[in-house]
Amino acid sequence: MQQVKLSSTWEAIREAGQNVLGEVARQGYDESFVFSVRLALEEGLINAVKHGNGMDSSKHIDLKYSITPECVEIVITDEGCGFCPVGVPDPTRDENLEKTTGRGIMLMRAFMDTVEYSERGNQLRLVKHGP
């Protein structure tokens, strides 16, 4: 796995995301596959900056990734105290439909084959298998 240590800034995660997605595209995956990985990667990195590290640019994000013809695997670790994804409200319930947040985990699960959080809750593992 390749590994990159990022500062918790929008610029750092944008650049890292572009680099990873460039490698995914160079591996020959189609546009739909790249879109799925992009959506999940961006959501995971944004959550790490915003929720995990609390927008504290002195904290870091550890981004590990492996891109092969068989699959893309991404592991994002932040310095936060973690959270339990089970407690996240269902964004499809009537009372949550008009909220502007809370859809990221649902989208990651819809577009990736595997979405796993570490026991501590500060590490996210994403896997998408090739066609």
Image (spheres, rainbow, N blue to C red):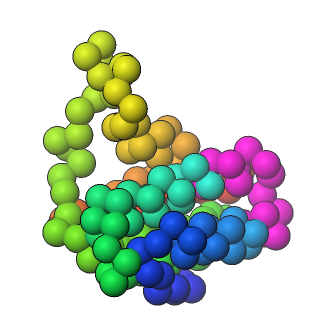
Q: Classify residue 57 as left or right of residue 127.
A: left
Relative vertical location of residue 52 with respect to residue 88 in this rendering, above or below: below
Q: Classify residue 73 as left or right of residue 98.
A: right
Q: Is residue 123 visible?
A: no
Q: Residue at x 75, y 69 (%)?
A: 22
Relative vertical location of residue 85 with respect to residue 4 in this rendering, above or below: above
Q: Classify residue 46 as left or right of residue 119.
A: right
Q: Position of residue 65 (x, y in %)?
A: 55, 76
Main SS, magenta residues = helix
Q: Is residue 56 visible?
A: yes
Q: Which residues are magenta?
A: 24-37
Find residue 106 and report its image quarter.
top left
Q: Position of residue 67 (x, y in %)?
A: 65, 72
Q: Is residue 30 magenta?
A: yes
Q: Position of residue 72 (x, y in %)?
A: 60, 65
Q: Position of residue 64 (x, y in %)?
A: 49, 79
